[in-house]
Amino acid sequence: MERGRDQIIYRLAEKHDRNLLRFVFLSPVAQRLIADWQDRSRRVVAEFRTDFSRHLRDPAMQSLVEELAAGSPAFREHWQEQAVLEREGGEREFRNPRRRFHQTTLTFTSHPDMKLVTLTPLPG
């Protein structure tokens, strides 16, 4: 039964928008899939705020913030905190099944808006 439920969760996650913010705050499975969701969601917003600050007049960015604020009380709360963080690497953990990864984030000096984020499975 557990394995079947896990497969359903992953299928739902895959069908959701590929935008990380939309997944974290608008997908019904994100809170069950992401370990320490409250802390991770707060950090994702603070990291996004760093990117957002470079595009204050971009209508698409404004629209995304409005969409997330309308659809998620948690996003609204985190956004109002006005925390700003650079994206970092480190350990990330997911549930169902429990998996741990090391996140590595590469940024390009010639294109600071581009980032490559990889998750490498950790042993165990």
Image (spheres, grey):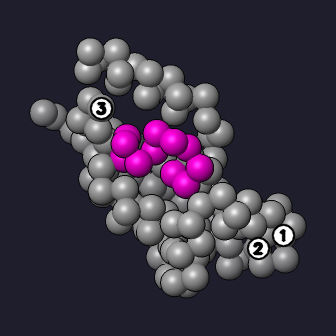
Structural distance between the alpha carbons of marks 2 and 1:
5 Å
Q: Amino acid at mark 1?
A: Asp
Q: Earlier in the sequence, mark 1 or mark 3?
A: 1
Helix, strand, or loop for circle 2? loop
In this picture, is 15 found above or below 107?
Answer: above
Q: Amino acid at mark 2?
A: His
* Magenta highlight range: 24-34
Q: Earlier in the sequence, mark 3 or mark 2?
A: 2
> Disc 1 marks which residue?
58
Q: Residue at x 44, y 69 (%)?
A: 42
> Most extreme residue toward the left, as rendered?
124
Q: Nearer the viewer, mark 1 or mark 3?
A: 3
How crowded pointer 1 is (Cα within 10 Å; few <14, some 14-19, many 20+) is rated as: few
Where is residue 122, by image quadrant?
A: top left
In the drawing, what numbered circle is on residue 96?
Answer: 3
> Disc 2 marks which residue?
55
Where is residue 95, by image quadrant?
A: top left
Q: Residue at x 35, y 22 (%)?
A: 5
Q: Position of residue 10 (x, y in %)?
A: 45, 27
Q: Position of residue 78 (x, y in %)?
A: 51, 74
* Marks 3,2: beta carbons within 8 A: no
How crowded pointer 3 is (Cα within 10 Å; few <14, some 14-19, many 20+) is rated as: some
Does residue 27 show up magenta in the picture? Answer: yes
Q: Residue at x 73, y 60 (%)?
A: 67
Q: Residue at x 37, y 56 (%)?
A: 37
Structural distance between the alpha carbons of marks 3 and 2:
36 Å
In this picture, is 41 found above or below 101?
Answer: below
Q: Quadrant of the C terminus?
A: top left
Helix, strand, or loop for circle 3? loop
* Marks 2,1: beta carbons within 8 A: yes
Does residue 70 show up magenta in the picture? Answer: no
